[in-house]
Amino acid sequence: MYKQLIKDKTRFVTSKGELSLEQLFTLSINELDALAVSLQEAYDKSSNKKSFIEKKTTKDKNLKLQLDVVLDILLTKQEEVETAKEKSENKARNQKIREIIAEKQDTALANKSINELKAMLTED
């Protein structure tokens, strides 16, 4: 899918000007969404004639390919955001667990008798 666009040096018309395939990855999710919508509208407009006899034009095929690539990049970026969110939530959860463990260890130590505490002391 990507090979043909790279080979043809396809450019995507965006609000930031014409962008290469590589530059699409610098767009935000909202910008990619807007680009996908505009490509879908252009594709619908150019291929509004329904026929099983007439072949799709090169322009139609290129628009569809551009749309598929933008949707793939959009999905990839959404998955990256979701993965980062899960990672952040796991990190926060693990930190909370570490804090609780430390509190419980402190409580367990505080509940020991003086003799047990003296026995635990080590020489410097």
Image (cartoon, rainbow, N blue to C red):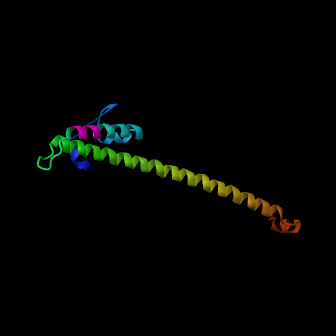
The x, y position of residue 58, in whole percent, is 15, 43
The image shows residue 105 at horizontal and vertical percentages of 75, 61
Residue 80 pos. (x, y %): 44, 49
Q: Is residue 84 left or right of residue 55?
A: right
Q: Indicate whether residue 3 is drawn in magenta.
A: no
Residue 15 versus residue 119 in the image, above or below? above
Q: Residue furthest left?
A: 53
In the rendered image, is residue 13 in sight?
A: yes
Taking depth in this image into account, of 74 and 49 the one nearest to the observer is 49
- Viewer-closest of 110 and 90: 90
* Stretch of the chain drawn in magenta: 40-45
Magenta stretch: helix, strand or loop mostly? helix
Residue located 43% across and 51% down the image:
79
Tell me which corner region of the image, top left, top right, bottom left or bottom right, holds residue 29.
top left
Quadrant where the image shows the C terminus: bottom right
Reply above or below: 99 against 26: below
Identify the residue shown where x is 32% and y is 42%. Answer: 22
Give whichever of 2, 30 is nearer the camera.
30
Residue 20 visible in the current orientation: no
| Quarter residue 94 falls in | bottom right
Spot the residue most to the front: 50
Q: Position of residue 70 (x, y in %)?
A: 32, 44
Q: Residue at x 18, y 45 (%)?
A: 50
Q: Is residue 78 left or right of residue 52?
A: right
Residue 5 left/right relative to 81: left
